[in-house]
Image: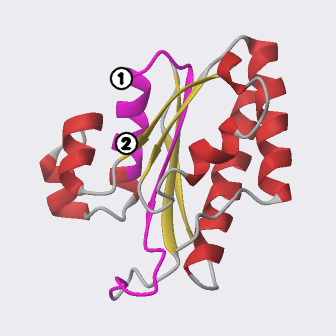
């Protein structure tokens, strides 16, 4: 098995994110499930990221989502791990448990197995939270193999962080 390295687009987005965060004197945190640390990896691939990256949580198992991020059991029971409700709870929990000003969360089905009716392989839920602001979320479906879904998820999460760091 080989690790997936950030692609050029993700590295460029992470670099832009860093500049936007530094301009606001903000720090960022991430909570990941299906991306398994690739989002934090893309961010920390940028030289100087220690000036704006706080902590990354890789919470693959539901129990980890609950214990490390405070995702309520009832959210997982009612909505499942792959849901906007879970992504929202992950982002909010990461923000509370870090020294960051901005958070992103990613949870989904990267494949090749694990899909279900209504949540096929490639379904990924995202959420972003900023201190003093609302938690925003969305769901996307990405095509391709496991690596493609994970790479697309990292890029999409970075785009959302960048948009919010720039203050829209």
| Placement of the C terminus among the 4 image quadrants | top right
Q: Position of residue 144 (x, y in %)?
A: 64, 85
Q: Residue at x 30, y 61 (%)?
A: 81
Residue 166 appears in the picture as rendered: no
Q: Position of residue 136 (x, y in %)?
A: 52, 43
Q: What segment is highlighted magenta in the picture?
A: 87-116
Query: Furthest residue to the top?
Result: 25
Q: Residues within 10 Å of mark 2 (few under 14, many from 20)?
A: many
Q: Residue at x 30, y 36 (%)?
A: 69
Kind of element beneath mark 1:
loop
Q: Is residue 5 left or right of residue 110?
A: right
The image quadrant that residue 143 belongs to is bottom right
* Residue sitting nearer the eye, 67 or 103: 67
Give me the C-alpha separation between circle 2 and circle 1.
Answer: 10 Å
Residue at label 1?
97
Q: Position of residue 36 (x, y in %)?
A: 47, 56
Residue 31 vertical position relative to residue 142 in the rendered view, above or below: above
Residue at label 2?
90
Residue 22 vertical position relative to residue 135 in the rendered view, above or below: above
């Amino acid at each position: 098995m080989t690790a997936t390295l950030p692609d050029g687009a993700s590295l460029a987005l992470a670099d832009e994110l860093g500049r936007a965060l530094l301009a606001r004197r903000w720090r960022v945190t991430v909570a990941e499930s299906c991306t398994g640390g690739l989002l934090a990896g893309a961010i920390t691939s940028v030289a100087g990221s220690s000036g704006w990256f706080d902590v990354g949580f890789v919470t693959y198992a539901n129990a980890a989502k609950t214990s490390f991020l405070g995702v309520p059991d009832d959210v997982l029971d009612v909505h499942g791990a792959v849901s906007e409700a879970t992504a929202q709870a992950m982002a909010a929990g990461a923000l509370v448990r870090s020294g960051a000003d901005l958070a992103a969360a990613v949870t989904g089905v990267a494949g090749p197995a694990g899909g279900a009716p209504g949540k096929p392989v490639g379904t990924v839920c995202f959420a972003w939270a900023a201190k003093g602001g609302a938690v925003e979320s969305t769901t996307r479906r990405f095509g391709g193999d496991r690596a493609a879904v994970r790479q697309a998820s990292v890029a999409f999460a970075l785009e959302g962080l960048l948009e919010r760091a720039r203050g829209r």
